[in-house]
């Protein structure tokens, strides 16, 4: 692994004696996009402000390129760029805004002009250069804000939920454009969001921040498929989280007692261990009782449909199997299977789709 | 009505005949009130930046004091400044009493709370994250303050106009600390008081019109500046 560009060491932030953030160690690697996900109030923005030298931690230090940041933070701030949730544009033209950080650094006019032209074009706002910032739409304003950050050619880009105030189509196109820019320019980025799908789209690594601490850090596959505890599991989209106990285990396959049912799961845990059984809704295959056919899935549970409701592009089914099991299916499948509350259905899933988390009951 | 009409005619005559007395008191008024406004702006904006951006403990109390300061009775300020500047007062060694500097001090004391209170409200009205954004853009503290002043310029110019208005229209303290000395500390307002006292209403009305015209001209200039399109 390459040396970190930025290292947080024993960071503690307290406001009015309340601990907001506690990060013993966190690295940002060169060229990576580190997505920090977590619910509202988890300390994500505080973490970003500490990195961006906009807030002094109560304890600990930040190392930039191996050197601790101390004294006047201005020289370090000038090596970074920060994009907030709101565009926070100055009351001037688009090009005035995009060039504002360069003006503050005393960059000569002609070079400033050249860089402003380049970055307004890359974010698709070249035609708006002379427009007053006040007249921009939300999407145009956030593009201006991103161009204003990237024009500085920062060593670290800090993004604090830059898409959360945008409507869905605007957000999608802006995420695509930013993704293209980050792929081309490979600037180390810390991207804070409460939206796990945004984190998946842009993040090379994902840190889950909850209650002011980093609960899990890893690749998207590690965090989303193998959450470290029940809360992280719930946050990353695991909708079935139920306590159980390993009854039997051999050759990496365990039989887990969950209520009156037994679920088979791929695991190295020992028999007798109390666990949380985690299952993502998209891993569950739902079929009618009559059309059960041989398949490789190790688990087939007879269930009764409890609730049916739309969830974005999918239908979310709550199935009663002695415990509540959640499945996502398409609208077409719902119609073909003719499922409604009270219908019988079989829920199937692979042993490898089940993730077990060691858990102490109570 | 005749009195007012005669006053207007007299005012025009005094202005266009180049009456040296009128030009002198007008110049004194502009000099002392302009200086007092500048001092009030420097102090008021510094106080406002500190209160709005640093949010120190006791901010509400300090703001209450400045808000109350907007209603400071000028005569009381005049008395206080006089006592300070008396030969036996704490600043008596400076020999400033009955000088233009004394008037500038008194008017600055009157205008500073006005500028401070209105500017604090103006800066507090900005999005609190805007300051963080400006710092994150790489602004030094001074650059950040200037950028934020520019963002709040409409309200800040209103504060400046209110401060200038409080200074130039002030008379009680001006007479008390300046002494209304002809050729030195006589301003438009103190001259008006004097002319009224002497029963020369025509000249008093003429000077009042000149004072109003000066205020109108300067406030119009400020307003044009305020309403200008934002600089690029």
Image: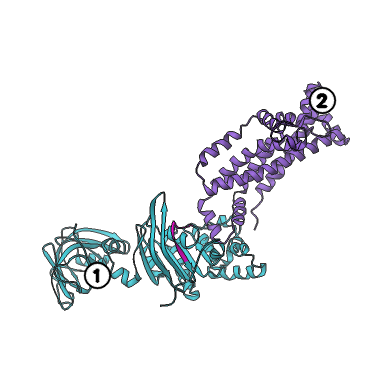
Question: In this rendering, do the residues under marks 1 and 2 share a single chain?
Answer: no
Numbered range of the magenta stretch: A55-62
Seen at 62% across and 48% down, the residue is B153
Q: Whole-percent x and y of residue A127? A: 58, 65
- Judged left or right of residue A277, residue B6 is right
**In-front residue for pair A254/A195:** A254
Local SS, label 1: helix
Q: Whole-percent x and y of residue A356? A: 22, 68
**In-front residue for pair B84/A181:** B84
Q: Identify the subunit bearing mark 2.
A: B
Q: Quote the CA–CA distance across marks 1 and 2.
A: 96 Å
Q: Which chain is cyan?
A: A
Quadrant that contains the C terminus of chain B: bottom right
Which residue in the protein does label 2 denote? Answer: B202
Local SS, label 2: helix
Q: In which quarter of the view is residue A24 placed?
A: bottom left
On the question of residue B13 being in view, the answer is yes
Quadrant that contains the N terminus of chain B: top right
Which residue in the protein does label 1 denote? Answer: A283
- Judged left or right of residue A113, residue A11 is left
Q: Colour of chain B?
A: purple
Seen at 19% across and 64% down, the residue is A338
**Number of on-image labels:** 2
Above or below: residue A75 compared with residue A253? above
């Amino acid at each position: 692994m390459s040396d970190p560009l930025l290292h947080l060491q024993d960071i503690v932030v307290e406001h009015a004696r309340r601990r907001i953030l506690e990060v013993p160690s966190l690295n940002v690697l060169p060229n990576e996009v580190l997505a920090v996900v977590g619910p509202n109030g988890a300390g994500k923005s505080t973490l970003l402000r500490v990195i961006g030298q906009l807030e002094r931690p109560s304890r600990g230090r930040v190392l930039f390129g191996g050197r601790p940041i101390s004294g006047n933070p201005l020289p370090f701030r000038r090596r970074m760029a920060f994009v907030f949730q709101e565009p926070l544009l100055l009351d001037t033209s688009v090009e005035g805004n995009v060039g504002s950080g360069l003006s503050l650094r005393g960059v000569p006019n002609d070079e400033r002009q050249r860089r402003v032209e380049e970055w307004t074009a890359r974010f698709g706002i070249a035609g708006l250069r002379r427009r007053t910032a006040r007249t921009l739409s939300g999407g145009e304003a956030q593009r201006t804000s991103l161009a204003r950050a990237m024009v500085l050619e920062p060593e670290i880009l800090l993004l604090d939920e830059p898409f959360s105030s945008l409507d869905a189509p605007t957000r999608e196109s802006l995420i695509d454009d930013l993704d293209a820019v980050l792929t081309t320019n490979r600037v180390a980025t810390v991207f804070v969001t409460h939206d796990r799908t945004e984190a998946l789209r842009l993040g090379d690594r994902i840190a889950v921040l909850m209650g002011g601490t980093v609960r899990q850090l890893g690749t998207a596959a590690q965090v989303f498929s193998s959450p470290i505890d029940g809360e992280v599991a719930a946050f990353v989209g695991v909708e079935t989280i139920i306590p159980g106990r390993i009854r039997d285990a051999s050759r990496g396959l365990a039989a887990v007692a969950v209520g009156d049912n037994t679920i088979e799961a791929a695991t190295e845990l020992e028999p007798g261990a109390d666990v949380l059984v985690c299952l993502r809704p998209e891993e569950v295959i739902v079929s009618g009782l009559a059309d059960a056919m041989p398949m490789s899935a190790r688990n087939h549970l007879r269930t009764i449909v409890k609730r049916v409701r739309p969830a974005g592009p999918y239908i979310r089914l709550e199935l009663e199997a002695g415990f509540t099991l959640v499945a996502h299916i398409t609208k077409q499948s719902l119609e073909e299977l003719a499922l409604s509350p009270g219908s019988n259905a079989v829920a199937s899933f692979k042993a490898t789709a089940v993730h077990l988390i060691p858990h102490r009951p109570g | 009505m005749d009195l007012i009409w005669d006053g207007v005619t007299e005012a025009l005559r005094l202005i266009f005949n180049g009456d040296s007395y009128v030009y002198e008191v007008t110049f004194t008024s502009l000099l002392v009130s302009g200086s007092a406004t500048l001092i009030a702006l420097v102090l008021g904006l510094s106080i406002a930046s500190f209160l709005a951006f640093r949010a120190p403990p006791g901010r509400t109390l300090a703001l209450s004091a400045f808000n109350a300061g907007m209603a400071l009775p000028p005569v009381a300020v005049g008395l206080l400044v006089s006592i300070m500047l008396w030969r036996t007062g704490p600043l008596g060694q400076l020999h400033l009493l009955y000088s233009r500097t004394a008037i500038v001090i008194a008017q600055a004391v009157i205008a500073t709370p006005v500028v401070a209170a209105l500017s604090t409200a103006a800066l507090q009205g900005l999005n609190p994250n805007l300051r963080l954004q400006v710092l994150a853009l790489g602004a030094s503290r001074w650059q950040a303050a200037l950028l934020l002043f520019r963002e709040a310029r409409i309200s800040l110019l209103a504060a400046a106009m209110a401060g200038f208005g409080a200074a130039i229209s002030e008379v009680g303290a001006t007479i008390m600390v300046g002494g209304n000395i002809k050729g030195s500390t006589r301003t438009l307002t103190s001259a008006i008081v004097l002319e009224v006292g002497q029963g020369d209403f025509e000249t008093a009305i003429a000077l009042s019109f000149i004072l109003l015209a000066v205020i109108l001209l300067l406030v119009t200039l400020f307003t044009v500046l305020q309403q200008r399109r934002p600089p690029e």
